[in-house]
Structures are given as C-alpha cells and as structure tokens.
Image (cartoon, grey):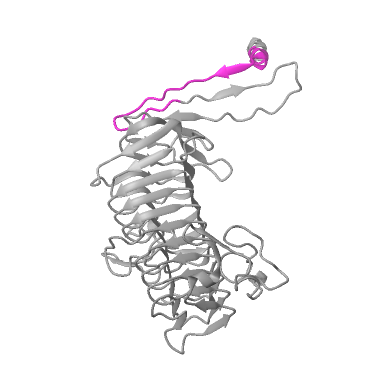
Amino acid sequence: MRGIALLMMVSSFTMCAKKIDVTTTPTTKPGEVAVVDTAKETTSTPSTPPTTPTTPTATYTIKPTDWQFDGAKVPAGAVIYIPAGTRSSLLIKNLKGNPEAPITIVNQGGQVHIDVASTASYAFKTTNCQFFKVLGNGVSSVKYGINLSGGNIGVTFDDLSTDFEVANIEVRNCAFAGIMAKTDPSCDAATQRGHFTMANVKVHDNYVHKTGGEGYYIGNSFYKDGVSLSCGRVMPHDVLNLKVYNNVADSTGCEGIQVGAAISGAEVYNNTVTNPGLSPFASGQNNGIQLGEGTGGKCYNNLIKNAPGNGIILLGLGDNLLYNNIIISAGGHGIFADSRYTPGPNFQFINNTIISPGQDGIKLNSETIPMNTAINNLIIITGSGTAINRMSRNVKLTSLNNYTGRDISAVKFVDFAGGDYRLQPGSPLLGAGALVLTYGITLDFYGKQRSGSTAVTIGATE
C-alpha cells in the first residue's frame, strides 16, 4: 500500500509540471555519429481540461566533422539538422520514417556547402532509407540551402532507398550525374524487380548544372532486358508514383533529365532544361529529356532549349501523354519516339510547341505502338526536316489540327527572343485547335485555362 501511495504522489507531481526539457546524448562507437535529441515534452496543467499529449518532435544535429549518420534509432517524424557552413561528403543510412511522419533532413542557420573532389564517389548519399525528406529550405531567404559541388555523383539515393522527397538543392561540378535515384540490380535478389520497388518519390525545385553526365538520373535504363551478371540476367526494380517538377538543369554532359522504369504514376513537368548533352559518353545521350524504357505517364509544361540531340526522346511504356512542352533549337528532332518496349496503347503528343529543330519536328519510329496521336502541335521547321515524319507506313498515326510552317514571326509570339511565348491577338493559332478536354488538358504552359467547349489554341500557350 505504501508503494501505491508513493506512486500516486509522484504521478500527481508529474501532472503539475508545465514543461520537461530532455537532452539525450547517446554513446557512440568509432565510425558512428554522435547526435543530440533536444525533444521537448509539454503536458497539461490542472487549470485546463485533460488533453491527450502530443508526441514531441525529436531533433538531431550532424556535426561538420561527421561523415556519416546512422539513423537506425531515429524515430519517425524527427528532424535532422545540417548546420550552415562548409563540410565534406555525408552518408545517411537506415532512416525509417512512416507515411504520416517522414524524417526530415534540412539545413540550419544558412547555406550548407558540401564540397568534395570530383574523384570522390559522392557528395551526399542515402542507403537503406525510407519515408524521409532532404530539403534545402531551412532558411527562407536562401533558395538552395544545400549546395553540393564535386563527386562522381552529387546526390544519390540508392541501396534500397525509397519513399523520399528532395527539394531546394543545388548540385554542380559532378563528374557524372547531379541527382541520381535508383538501386541497380545485383545478384542479391532484394535489389531486383518483384522484390524491391522504389515508390512515392518527389524531386522538385532543384538546380543541377555543369555535370559530366545526366543532370537528373532516376530509375534504371534497361527495363526491358535487364543486365547480365555472374548470376545470370537480373531485372531492375519498378518505380511508382514519381514526380519530377520545377527543376532546372543546365550545361549537363548528357540528358538534362532521364527517367527509366517508372511504370505507373510518373509525371515530369514544369522543368527547364537548357544546354544539355555537351559531352555525352556515347551517341544518342545528348537529348533534353529522356523518358526511357518502362516509363509511362505524363510529360508536360517543360521548356527545353539547345539540346544537341532530341528535345524529348520517348522510349516509354506506351501510355505516354506529352503536352504543353516548348522545345527550341534541338539539334536533332523536336520529339523522337521509338517503341522498344511498349505494351501500352498510345503515344500522345498534344499542344506542344516545337521551334527550329535541326531535323524533324516529331519523328515517329514507333511501329509497334497501336496508335500515335498528334493534335494541336505547333511546329516551325527552318531547316530541311519534316513537321511529322513517320518511319514507315507501319507507324499508325492520328493527326489533327497541327500548325506547321517556316516563319516564326507568323506565329506572333509576344516576345520570342525574350522568352515570352504567349500569343498576341491576331495569331493564326488562336482558336484553331481541336478540343482536348478528354485528354485531361485544361491549362496551357503558363497555367491559363484552356477552353473546354469551343476550339482551343494550337501550341503550348494560349
């Protein structure tokens, strides 16, 4: 009875406490990172009705001298701070948040600079992490709060990392890719299709420039046939619910954005790609955006300029919808489509603006796709190419209300040279297009509403 009375007394004292500050410094082993948990817990007082206490947010700080952070014991919903200043490469591993409470990694107090030699494997890497965010928005006045320079790969999410978001990061001067997200298949079955799926990935509001290879490299490039290893042929994992948007890629060695194996829920939109493909590893790797094998979904509202190869190269799944893209001065075709692995029903090209490609506006080598659809595209050919060119009669095509010509001035852009691609009154494109509401296209490149009941405008802009 005395024990019970004592327990009730302690409990009563606890209920009267207004705030408890808890600081925990875990012990570390060589090679591990010391972290500080500064969680604060608040409980109700007798003067207010009893309430259910909220779970405190655990916070951790990675010291500038730490090269790795093991998050195996970090709770869901925690925040991990990277203090402002210059540091070397950083490896994050074993984070396990959950869908309702992802773990957030964010800069603190200013801009973080991660500077490494180009011979280093990476500047920032995650391994075996799930339900987490890497954000450079810790200080509102700094757009890219995490700035990375060097490394073979600037930022890489691999080794079974999935369910993550990366935003407000600047990556530059990489020997290979700027931001990479994939786990290449190995002889370990856990890495292969059917065993691992990378899902629910958001890559947005980042700036990648001056890379030796791709700017953004997401998913494996060999979806159809896989890769041959000592244990036999192994297949790369699927990618589900991928969103790549509001990113900038400039002066990349290969494609500005390359996506592969994104079989469902993929959207690539509102990105700006300029001067890609400056030093490709091989021919055919100098395009603006590549939608590779196994990639379906939507690609829209992207601006692509000065790609030495194709503005957009489509090797997709066959449920691909490309619309409201503006492609200027591609050295090859504005859009090139090939049906290497296309179990889906259709390639659809709607309301795109293609200006001065070196070859054709839209080149269709997609012989095995059941139907190609080209509607309301603006194509200005200033060279010897063809507006829409089929490889052979085996390429099935539905073509409606496309505007083709050779005179850019006849289009009547507001300010083409200055980058304003809206149309002036009197443009021959206004109201000359077919209705496209059934394709789910309701807005133009600038977000202006398109007509749903009368003829719409041709091209990417109203």
Answer with left or right where residue 32 lies relative to residue 133: left
Whether residue 458 can be seen here:
yes
Examine the structure image and report whether residue 460 is included in the region drawn in magenta.
no
The quadrant in which residue 36 appears is: top left
Report x, y in % for residue 191: 38, 57
Q: Where's residue 362, x and y in %?
A: 46, 76
Chief SS of the magenta region? loop
- From this viewpoint, is residue 196 visible? no
Locate residue 393 relative to residue 12 in the image: left or right. left
Q: Hey, which residue is sitting farthest left in the picture?
A: 119
Residue 20 location (% of width, % of height): 57, 18
- 96 shown above or below 213: above
| Horizontal side of residue 11 vs 184, given as left or right | right
Q: Residue furthest bottom?
A: 393
Front residue of 124/51: it is 124
Q: Nearer the viewer, residue 182 or 3?
A: 182
Residues in magenta, as a range: 10-36
Q: Measured from the top left, where is residue 26 in percent x and y?
A: 41, 25
Quadrant of the drawing holding the N terminus: top right
Q: Residue at 32% across / 51% down in the picture?
A: 210
